[in-house]
Structures are given as structure tokens and as C-alpha cells.
Amino acid sequence: MKKILLVCNAGMSTSMLVKKMQEAANEMSIEASIEAKSLADAKNEIAEADIILLGPQIRYELDNVKKVAGTTPVEAINMMDYGMMNGKKVLEHALSVIG
């Protein structure tokens, strides 16, 4: 089971992307727990995540989140994929990072 944590300002704008990513995971027969959280709420769940994906609107927080995340990979979601709500592409990128 892969745990993917998406982080944005309020956790709302990424909820649609989470749905698209979960649909893609189901189609690819990949067991994944994908959640969207606000930056404040995410800090409590970073330790359990396999990867943290930041929404483009908070990519400026990348270095700060990396410090808190320790060895957990932290990536900013590609702006084009985010805008197009391309859940499959975002999922594939996350999986390629965590192996």
C-alpha cells in the first residue's frame, strides 16, 4: 500500500485530483491511499506518507516541507498536470519517485 499525501493551501483544490488519482490507481490495480490535506494538517501525517506532493500554489513551501519530511520525498505537482487534473500522470510520477 502506497500512501500519497497531496498538500495545498486548504486541502480543497486537490480533492478533485485525489479522486482522479484514485481512479487511475484502481485501473492500474495499485493499492494506494491518496489524501489531500492543508499544509497545517499535513504536518501531522508526513511521517506516515511514502511521498508528499505539493500543489503548484504552495510550491514556494517546498524547501520548508522537505526539512520537516526528513527522508520522505517531497515534490511539487507539475502545474500543467494539476491544471488538467491528470490524475494518472501525477500518480505515475509519484510512483516513479518512490519506486
Image (spheres, rainbow, N blue to C red):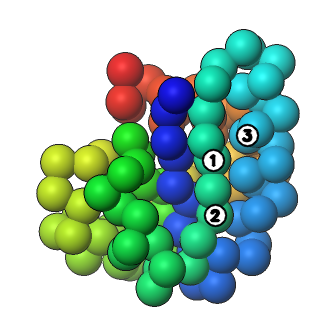
Side of 96 relative to 74 (left or right): right
Q: Residue at 72%, 27% (x, y): give it.
A: 25
Q: Say which label, 2 or 3, has the lower sequence index.
A: 3
Q: Is residue 73 above or below residue 91?
A: below
The residue beneath circle 1 is 34
| Type of amino acid under label 1 | Ile
Q: Is residue 69 above or below residue 75?
A: below
Q: For the image shown, how many numbered marks are present on the structure? A: 3
Name the secondary structure under disc 2.
Answer: strand
Asked whether the residues under the numbered discs 1 and 2 touch, taking CB atoms below 8 Å apart as contact, a structural biologist would say: yes
Position in image of residue 17 (x %, y %): 76, 53
The residue beneath circle 2 is 36
Position in image of residue 90 (x %, y %): 62, 40
The residue beneath circle 3 is 21
Side of 56 relative to 68 (left or right): right
Q: Residues within 10 Å of mark 1 (few under 14, many from 20)?
A: some
Q: Quadrant of the C terminus?
A: top left
